[in-house]
């Protein structure tokens, strides 16, 4: 055997490469890019990936990958561990990732939902599902789903539409091309998303003579795209004639590390800044021109300014329907889209400026008289509306519920904030679905970058607890608070046990409104009667109205758990949880009826055109009126 090669199984080569690859940060320092691997073993990966991971730490004299190999973490649900990996990458602003290995069949397809979440949110995720035998000698293998029209299809082909890059490794040598391509996608600012490498179990164990220098790859870099000169000049002209501009800051601001530049730019030119779900926390809540959340879940300040603006500067946002009020919130304003993604630049017939957000804002800050037509009244009005909204947030989150009334989300958010002994705006909140994203988008206050962790691209129920696990691994110095409704808790909660097993501290607040309260309100707002959402509406003819004891359930998985009776009791329990190690689960009964009415915008849903219900007919007529306002 040549000294220039080393004989390894495909799985050994794969894990060695992953353990070797580094990323160069903006300051020139080098760090491991893949900091760990999640795995649940089955017959599709235990003998290949499992063997390789177990032996990765064994040294040989030619070892040039990092010592101690690749930490391996074991979860209880494949979707959950993929969610944890996604949340880790998001908390690391896409500069560090974790890999995820599963067996074939259900172990693999359990991760398809997570892949879709990463795809929608443009987050890096390396999926390594086991696959059927390439040789087909034992065909059909256990857990194989056969396609009777195509012999080369397995369930892993489900990953194709939810992966930014997909490959099936049919020969060990294919790693030489597949892995560099995979990592190029994982670090591309515009293409970033999930990568799936399907690994037939016999090929995982097959050996080949790999070049040794393959395991000394060039460090990765996150490229920063500079704008085209013509687009820059066009943007200058657009900015110069704006009288009432509004910035909408999206997730791209965070991933570009442009928070400081955004704060300086907004302050220098006195331009109001509204935040999307993905962009929240890029700007401190105390910034005088932070006007809060935008869109369907928007603050009165941001939505009022959006309706009056003559220019929307969309930075790092795809302007999804919750941001744009289904394209009816600012139908007449000119839109300047600053983004690295070509697809996102095409939204709403916007004027495009394809560039890294940080580089562009740095360039704008160097210009003199970038805005020449700004209205002084607009600047003052922005500040006034921002302050009025902050005063209202304080009121909503410090009030007590009315007598004999269950609390709602705003009061729970206030209790969390007030339970912090020193810095109430330094906690990281994690959430994903239900009513809570609306309340948190409006009411959660962020002092630090990344202190708001929301999946609202996919709004995936069940992401919350598993996601918090990834956040805590990424930012162990922060208090990570999970806010989750009873519906999402029931979807996925097993990673409570994983957090305990790993010795990680999480505070999980379960808001129990006894069903899918958010969708129940949407159902009624669309004119339909209550049906199939709240648990009490779902009791069958011979069924029983079920009471779910969430605190006992969490205790059974090793957590400290407590059901509290009211907001004051919750504050006490939260203070105790902050002083406690491990996982604390605090359950409080909340109402499905009360919400924060301030702000908001129209959202298009499919209301029945024909219905026997008068309220549905009225809702349809209102919908048609709102549709007439949509941007065309």
Image (cartoon, helix red, strand yellow):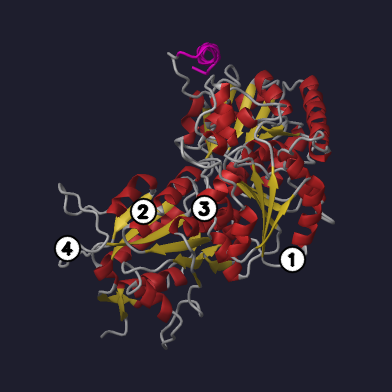
Q: Which residue is tagged 2?
A: 109
**Residue segment shown in magenta:** 612-632
Cα separation, mark 1 vs mark 4, equals 52 Å
Say if 455 sits above or below 524 in the image.
below
**Disc 3 or 1, which lies upstream in sequence?**
3
Determine whether the residue tagged by mark 1 lies in a helix, strand or loop. loop
Mark 4, other Cα within 10 Å: few <14 / some 14–19 / many ≥20: few
Mark 1, other Cα within 10 Å: few <14 / some 14–19 / many ≥20: some
Q: Is residue 53 left or right of residue 481?
A: left
What type of secondary structure mainly makes up the magenta span? helix
Q: Which residue is tagged 4?
A: 139
Say if 553 sits above or below 113 in the image.
below
Mark 2, other Cα within 10 Å: few <14 / some 14–19 / many ≥20: many
The answer, for residue 265, to whether it is visible in the render is no
Q: Which residue is tagged 3?
A: 492
Q: Quadrant of residue 594?
A: top right
């Amino acid at each position: 055997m040549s000294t220039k090669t080393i004989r390894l199984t495909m799985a050994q080569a794969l894990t060695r490469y992953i353990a070797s690859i580094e990323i160069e940060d903006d300051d020139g320092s080098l760090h491991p890019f893949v900091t760990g691997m999640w795995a649940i073993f089955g017959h599709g990966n235990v003998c290949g990936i499992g063997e390789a991971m177990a032996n990765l730490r064994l040294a040989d004299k030619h070892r040039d990958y990092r010592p101690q190999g690749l930490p391996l973490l074991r979860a209880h649900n494949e979707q959950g561990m993929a969610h944890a990996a996604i949340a880790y990458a998001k908390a690391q602003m896409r500069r560090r990732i974790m890999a995820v290995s599963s067996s074939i069949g259900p172990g693999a397809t359990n991760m398809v939902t997570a892949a879709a979440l990463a795809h929608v949110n443009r987050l890096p995720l390396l999926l390594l599902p086991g696959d059927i035998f390439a040789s087909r000698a034992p065909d059909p293998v256990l857990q194989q789903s056969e396609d009777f029209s195509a012999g080369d299809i397995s369930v892993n082909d489900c990953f194709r539409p939810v992966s930014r890059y997909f490959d099936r490794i049919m020969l060990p040598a294919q790693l030489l091309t597949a892995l560099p391509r995979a990592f190029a996608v994982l670090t591309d600012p515009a293409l970033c998303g999930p990568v799936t490498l399907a690994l037939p179990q016999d090929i995982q164990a097959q050996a080949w003579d790999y070049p040794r220098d393959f395991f000394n790859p060039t460090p990765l870099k996150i490229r920063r795209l500079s704008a085209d000169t013509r687009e820059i000049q066009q943007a200058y002209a657009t900015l110069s004639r704006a009288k009432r501009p509004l910035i909408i800051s999206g997730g791209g601001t965070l991933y570009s590390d442009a928070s400081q530049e955004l704060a300086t730019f907004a302050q220098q030119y006195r331009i109001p800044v509204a935040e999307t779900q993905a962009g929240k926390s890029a700007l401190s809540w105390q910034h005088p021109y932070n006007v809060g959340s935008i869109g369907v879940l928007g603050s009165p300040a941001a939505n009022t300014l959006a309706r009056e603006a003559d220019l929307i500067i969309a930075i790092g946002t795809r302007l999804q329907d919750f941001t744009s009020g289904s394209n009816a919130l600012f139908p007449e304003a000119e839109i300047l889209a600053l983004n690295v993604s070509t697809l996102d630049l095409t939204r709403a017939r916007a004027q495009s400026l394809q560039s890294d957000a940080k580089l562009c804002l740095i360039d704008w800050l160097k210009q003199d008289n970038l805005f020449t037509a700004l209205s002084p009244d607009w600047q003052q009005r922005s500040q006034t509306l921002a302050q009025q909204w902050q005063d209202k947030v304080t009121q909503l989150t410090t009030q007590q519920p009315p007598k004999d009334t269950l609390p709602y989300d705003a009061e729970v958010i206030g209790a969390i904030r007030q339970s912090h002994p020193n810095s109430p705006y330094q906690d990281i909140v994690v959430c994903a679905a239900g009513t809570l994203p609306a309340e948190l988008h409006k009411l959660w206050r962020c002092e630090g970058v990344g202190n708001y962790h929301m999946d609202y691209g996919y709004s995936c129920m069940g992401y919350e607890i598993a996601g918090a696990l990834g956040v805590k691994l990424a930012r162990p110095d922060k208090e990570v608070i999970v806010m989750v409704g009873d519906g999402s808790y029931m979807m996925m909660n097993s990673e409570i046990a994983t957090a305990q097993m790993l010795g990680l501290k999480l505070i999980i607040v379960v808001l129990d409104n006894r069903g899918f309260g958010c969708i129940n309100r949407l159902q009624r707002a669309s004119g339909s009667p209550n049906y199939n959402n709240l648990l009490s509406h779902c009791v069958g003819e011979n069924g029983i109205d079920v009471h779910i004891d969430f605190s006992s359930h969490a205790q059974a998985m090793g957590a400290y758990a407590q059901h509290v009776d009211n907001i004051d009791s919750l504050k006490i329990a939260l203070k105790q949880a902050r002083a406690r190690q491990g996982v604390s689960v605090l359950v409080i009964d909340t109402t499905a009826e009360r919400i924060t009415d301030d702000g908001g915008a129209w959202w298009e849903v499919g209301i029945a055109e024909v219905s026997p219900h008068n309220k549905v007919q009225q809702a349809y007529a209102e919908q048609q009126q709102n549709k007439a306002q949509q941007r065309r």
